[in-house]
């Protein structure tokens, strides 16, 4: 039933918006107007000692937030990424993630709890009734908004409660540092790590498939073999990081067919050692055509002539594959005579 179907004499009378006004239901007005309950002052409104206690509580919450933010930064810097702790009943979890979550959550909670306690105990709690106004912001409305803002600022006692103001500013100023510290994950800068691999003078060339050191007799003309540095095992923690730079491609070509003079000097009896990592975007090269001595990257078809210093003859790669100088030790095994002649893989911004 709509209001138009109700007799006019039974419709609710105009509400009295004065504070505490209550109109009970009767035969003439069946809808009771509850009005607003009488205002009751809080203990903080009449007892300055209680107000001081609330002020100290709010300040304590903001201070705890600051300490939690400092703890977040300290945890991020000091706790190892791979460290785990046992937390009942969750079990073993990352110590770093647990510390970051707890400190960040505590910092946020204390800021929110401090603001809520401040509003409920110290700010003005008088309820005000206001008539609805048009959507457009008329000049008198804008003036009223500014007046309300100034009144709210005055009632917040922010100027008089300096302890709250200072600790709140401290908490809000320190908390964003949590996000700033996370920018550390954009670094650190690689420095010279991309210029060097595990290869060094005397490192044996180990077959990737058999995990055995290689002799010259293990490679025949036209064959392609993949090798890794001696001492690098697949179960090592940093295996993937190191093999991404140290992966080696061995090819045996008749010495008379090697066009590049330096490539011939760095080889051993026609055995050439080149980086397996494409210089375009770092894909592993695995396709070899023994008649032309061309190696093809399967990702974007960059093609390298292994008989001519692994120069690029087709595709988007920007420079030849780095070569590793090799020789034979006293026991007849192939060994490295140093590191690659230049950084492995694609170009990077520090290179030059």
Image: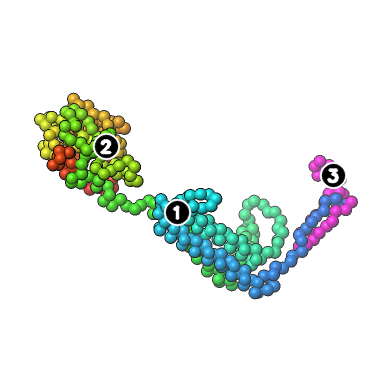
Figure quadrant of residue 233: top left
Contact, mark 2 vs mark 1 (Cβ under 8 Å): no
* Relative side of 338 to 193, left or right: left
Residue holding disc 2: 211
Q: Nearer the viewer, residue 90 or 56?
A: 90
Q: Which mark is residue 25?
A: none
Residue holding disc 3: 6
Q: Residue furthest right?
A: 27
Q: Where, quadrant-wise, is the N terminus in this rendering?
A: top right
Task: List x then y, in percent, for residue 246.
Answer: 26, 42
Residue at image x 70%, y 54%? 132
Foreground mark, 2 or 1, reads 2
Task: List x then y, in percent, for residue 108.
Answer: 53, 58
Q: Residue furthest top?
A: 291
Does residue 129 belong to the magenta stretch?
Answer: no
Q: Main secondary structure of the magenta part?
A: loop
Residue at image x 86%, y 45%? 7
Q: Classify mark 1: helix, strand or loop.
A: helix
Task: List x then y, in percent, for residue 239.
Answer: 32, 43
Q: Nearer the viewer, residue 119 or 321?
A: 321
Residue at image x 89%, y 51%? 27
User: Could you tell me how far apart the alpha carbons at marks 3 and 2 are, in whole angstroms?
Assistant: 94 Å
Asked whether the viewer can see residue 61, the reply is yes
Q: Which residues are magenta?
A: 1-27
Task: List x then y, in percent, for residue 218.
Answer: 19, 32
Q: Is residue 183 above or below residue 246?
A: below
Q: Residue furthest front?
A: 331
Q: Which mark is residue 96?
A: 1
Among the two numbered marks 3 and 2 on one chain, the one whose residue lies closer to the N terminus: 3
């Amino acid at each position: 039933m709509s209001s138009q179907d109700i007799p006019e004499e039974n419709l609710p009378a105009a509400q009295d918006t004065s504070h505490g006004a209550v109109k009970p239901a009767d035969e003439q007005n069946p809808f009771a107007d509850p009005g607003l309950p009488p205002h009751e002052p809080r203990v903080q409104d009449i007892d300055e000692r209680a107000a001081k206690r609330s002020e100290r509580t709010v300040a304590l919450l903001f201070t705890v937030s600051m300490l939690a933010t400092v703890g977040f930064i300290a945890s991020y810097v000091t706790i190892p990424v791979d460290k785990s702790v046992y937390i009942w009943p969750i079990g073993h979890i990352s110590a770093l993630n647990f510390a970051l979550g707890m400190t960040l959550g505590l910092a946020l909670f204390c800021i929110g709890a401090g603001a809520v306690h401040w509003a409920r105990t110290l700010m003005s709690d008088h309820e005000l009734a206001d008539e609805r106004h048009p959507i457009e912001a008329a000049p008198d409305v804008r003036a009223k908004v500014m007046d309300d803002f100034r009144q709210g600022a005055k009632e917040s006692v922010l100027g008089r409660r300096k302890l709250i103001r200072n600790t709140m500013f401290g908490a809000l100023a320190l908390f964003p540092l949590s996000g700033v510290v996370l920018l550390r994950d954009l670094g650190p800068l690689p420095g010279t790590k991309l210029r060097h691999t595990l290869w060094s003078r005397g490192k044996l060339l180990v077959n990737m498939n058999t995990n055995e050191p290689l002799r010259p007799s293990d490679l025949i003309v036209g064959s392609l073999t993949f090798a890794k540095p001696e001492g690098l095992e697949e179960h090592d923690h940093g295996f993937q990081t190191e093999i991404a730079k140290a992966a080696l491609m061995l090819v045996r070509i008749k010495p008379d067919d090697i066009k590049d003079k330096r490539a011939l000097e760095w080889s051993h009896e026609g055995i050439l050692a080149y980086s397996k990592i494409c210089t375009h975007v770092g894909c592993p090269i695995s396709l070899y055509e023994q008649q032309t001595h061309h190696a093809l990257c399967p990702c974007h078809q960059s093609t390298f002539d292994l008989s001519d210093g692994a120069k690029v003859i087709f595709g988007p790669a920007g420079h030849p594959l780095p070569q590793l100088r090799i020789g034979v030790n006293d026991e007849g095994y192939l060994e490295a005579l140093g590191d690659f002649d230049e950084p492995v893989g694609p170009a990077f911004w520090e290179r030059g």
